Amino acid sequence: MRNRICAPLTACLFSFFSTYLAAQSAPATLQIFAIDVEGGQATLLVSPSGQSMLVDTGWPGFNGRDADRIVSAAKVAGVQQIDYLVLTHYHNDHVGGVTQLADRIKIGTFVDHGPNLEEADQTRNNYAEYQRVLASGKAKHLVAKPGDRIPISGVNVQVLAAARQHIREPLSGAGQPNPLCASEPAPPDDPSENSASLGLLVTYGKFRFIDLGDLTKKKEIELVCPNNPIGKVDVYLVDHHGLNQSSAKAFVQAVHPRVAIMNNGAHKGGNPEAWQTVHASPGVEDLWQLHYAVDSDRRHNSAENLIANLNDVDGNYIKLVALPDGSFTVLNSRNNFQKSY
């Protein structure tokens, strides 16, 4: 009797410890949430160590809609505070939600490019409101410069651009000439805060993710011409929500993404020209969108499975989970469609 009872118990214990050891040896993941803030930006990253970094806060107003969506995504990600809040620039759709967010969740450190560089009343007001949040003294503050690193354990977060400056020295394995520079049309100067955007490259093992905020074409081209100091990336968060002022061909093809994610709104971004530039870039397997671009056309929107919000639906996010071997999976929270790369 004892042997008959013991045998299944032994098998059960063996199975338990095998499962436990497999879980312990499985590599941790990097999570990235592209949160729907209706054509603004709010991108939450959770490192394998559990530290969190949020890039931008969406719009103000709307009864705290965007701040609430960010907090909800943080709960899904399993984090209770934002360790680093990176503000790419001081436009309403990026910094506008900072006050409401700070009232809802603890923020450890604010990161920005320094003082406002745009002569516009609304941008000056946005910057002043942000300064009031900083003055509360509840969080630390860092001004980031190109070449700096944001000290998040488990990933390498490299500042590529800030305050209209960019890295000069190539990153490891990069620095090759960019043959598209000579044929790229010269874009106009951009005196707005867009051109001052704080841009990041996040690396986890072999996986690379780039987010340059609303950087516009002239600064994109300066960043990768005549040589490309960045190299190739796996995932490109499409600059400036897919507006035509950004996503220069010489830039997009230089970073050569496998997948692109566009944080457009139903009536903002997703312009056909920018969409086509990204979609047609050699090596791009898929272009995911936060919204169907209503003001575009069917040919310049992705397949519905790759769009988080359709018609009058909103609030759904796109989630990416990356492994250090460079593989990753993207999930549409609207329909739970996912695809691995």
Image: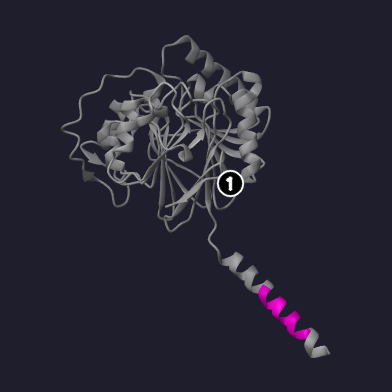
| Viewer-proximal residue among 257 and 129 | 257
| Viewer-proximal residue among 114 and 26 | 26
- Does any portion of residue 162 appear in the rendered image? no
- Does any portion of residue 132 appear in the rendered image? yes
User: Residue at horizontal 68%, vertical 30%?
Assistant: 104
Q: Which residue is mark 1?
A: 51
Where are the magenta residues, as a range? Answer: 6-15
Q: Position of residue 312 (x, y in %)?
A: 56, 25
Specify few, some or many for label 1: CA neighbours under 10 Å numbering under 14, 14-19, or 20 or more. Answer: some
User: Residue at horizontal 42%, vertical 55%?
Assistant: 326
Using the image, determine if residue 148 lies above or below residue 247: below
| Viewer-proximal residue among 331 and 321 | 331
| Viewer-proximal residue among 247 and 113 | 247
Per the image, label 1 sits on a secondary structure element best described as loop
Name the side, left or right, on which 52 lies relative to 1.
left
Residue 74 quadrant: top right
Using the image, determine if residue 179 lies above or below residue 183: below
User: Residue at horizontal 47%, vertical 49%?
Assistant: 339
* Quadrant of the frame with the N terminus: bottom right
